[in-house]
């Protein structure tokens, strides 16, 4: 099974107030499909944007062969610098 580390949209669509979870999910699953593990969150509605990423869990998945999307990779790099 191929695993991707990507963002899953949550929040209130009526108010267009979206938050994002960073999750490990099967590559064939839809964006809002069944999650293997939750790795963090990203909230762009706050100024400045707030995010939290569990680096240890993320690195565990990467060692097992999971691939990160570009956006998750950017957040990962920001977390590593801080």
Image (cartoon, helix red, strand yellow):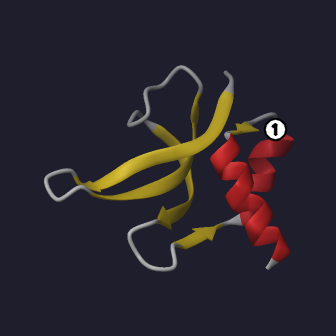
Quarter-of-image position of residue 38: bottom right
Identify the secondary structure beneath mark 1: loop
Q: Nearer the viewer, residue 56 or 21?
A: 21
Residue lying at 74% horizontally and 64% vertically, measured from the top left: 55
Quarter-of-image position of residue 78: bottom right
Q: Label 1 belongs to which residue? A: 64
Where does residue 41 sit, x and y in percent of width and height?
A: 51, 63
* Total numbered labels placed on residues in the image: 1
Q: Is residue 44 left or right of residue 58?
A: left
Q: Nearer the viewer, residue 47 or 78?
A: 47
Q: Is residue 16 left or right of residue 74?
A: left
Q: Quadrant of the C terminus?
A: bottom right
Asked if residue 68 is positioned above or below residue 21 in the image, the reply reads above
Where does residue 56 sit, x and y in percent of width and height?
A: 77, 63
Residue lying at 66% horizontally and 51% vertically, measured from the top left: 72
- Residue furthest to the front in view is 47
Where does residue 32 sit, x and y in percent of width and height?
A: 38, 37
Q: Is residue 59 visible?
A: yes
Residue lying at 13% horizontally and 53% vertically, measured from the top left: 14
- Residue furthest to the left in view is 14
Residue lying at 44% horizontally and 56% vertically, measured from the top left: 20
Where does residue 77 sit, x and y in percent of width and height?
A: 79, 61
Q: Is residue 49 left or right of residue 60?
A: left
Q: Quadrant of the N terminus?
A: top right
Q: Is residue 39 left or right of residue 29?
A: right
| 10 Å crowding of disc 1: few (<14), some (14-19), many (20+) | few
Q: Nearer the viewer, residue 42 or 58?
A: 42
Q: Is residue 57 visible?
A: no
């Amino acid at each position: 099974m191929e695993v991707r580390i990507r963002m899953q949209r949550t929040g209130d669509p009526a108010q267009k107030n979206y938050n994002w979870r960073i999750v490990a999910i099967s590559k064939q699953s839809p964006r809002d499909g069944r999650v293997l593990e939750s790795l963090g969150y990203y909230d762009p509605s706050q100024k400045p944007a707030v995010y939290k990423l569990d680096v240890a869990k993320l690195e565990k998945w990467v060692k097992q062969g999971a691939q990160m999307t570009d956006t998750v990779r950017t957040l990962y790099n920001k977390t590593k610098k801080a």
